[in-house]
Amino acid sequence: MAITSTQSADKGIVHRAVGSYITTGTAAAFNITTGFQPRYVRVVNETSGDQIEWFEGMADAEGFKRVAAGTGAMVTTLGITPLTYGFTVGLDIDINVTSQQLSWMALG
């Protein structure tokens, strides 16, 4: 049996940024500037209770999504993409919704 395991040690510097986002225009993917490349991002739709998380090692536009109904699943498109100085939140129809309050946290 083969085991593959990866791990990223604490680099001694931890960045944290939190914020909120809401748009009354047409929902679209949007960028958040944090000033660092995140290793973890969580976005919560406060209106619906749905949320998505991205961890270092996941592909761009992926995330683990939990909906308020209690189900969770990996998404491979329209999720979260890390950027050099922040991240992009894709146009997932449960998370990124016009006139619904989003709160987010990024750790780097």
Image (spheres, rainbow, N blue to C red):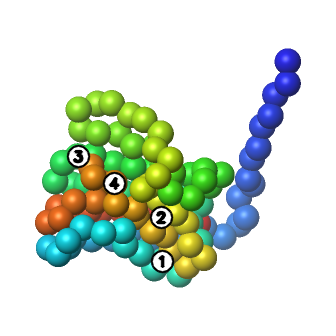
Q: State the CA–CA distance, disc 3 to disc 1.
A: 24 Å
Q: State the CA–CA distance, disc 1 to disc 2.
A: 8 Å
Which label belongs to residue 106?
2
Q: Nearer the viewer, mark 4 or mark 1?
A: 4
Q: State the CA–CA distance, disc 3 to disc 2.
A: 18 Å
Q: Which residue is mark 1?
A: 34
Q: State the CA–CA distance, disc 4 to disc 1.
A: 21 Å
Q: Nearer the viewer, mark 4 or mark 3?
A: 4
First-in-chain label (4 vs 1): 1
Q: Amino acid at mark 4?
A: Asp
The picture places residue 69, in percent across and down from the top left corner, at 23, 32
Q: Amino acid at mark 1?
A: Thr
Q: Which residue is mark 4?
A: 92
Above/below status of 61 relative to 26: above
First-in-chain label (1 vs 2): 1
x 23%, y 46%: residue? 49
Mark 4 residue crowding within 10 angstroms, few (<14) / some (14–19) / many (20+): some
Pointers 1 and 2 in contact (C-beta within 8 Å)? yes
Q: Nearer the viewer, mark 3 or mark 2?
A: 3
Mark 3 residue crowding within 10 angstroms, few (<14) / some (14–19) / many (20+): some
First-in-chain label (3 vs 1): 1
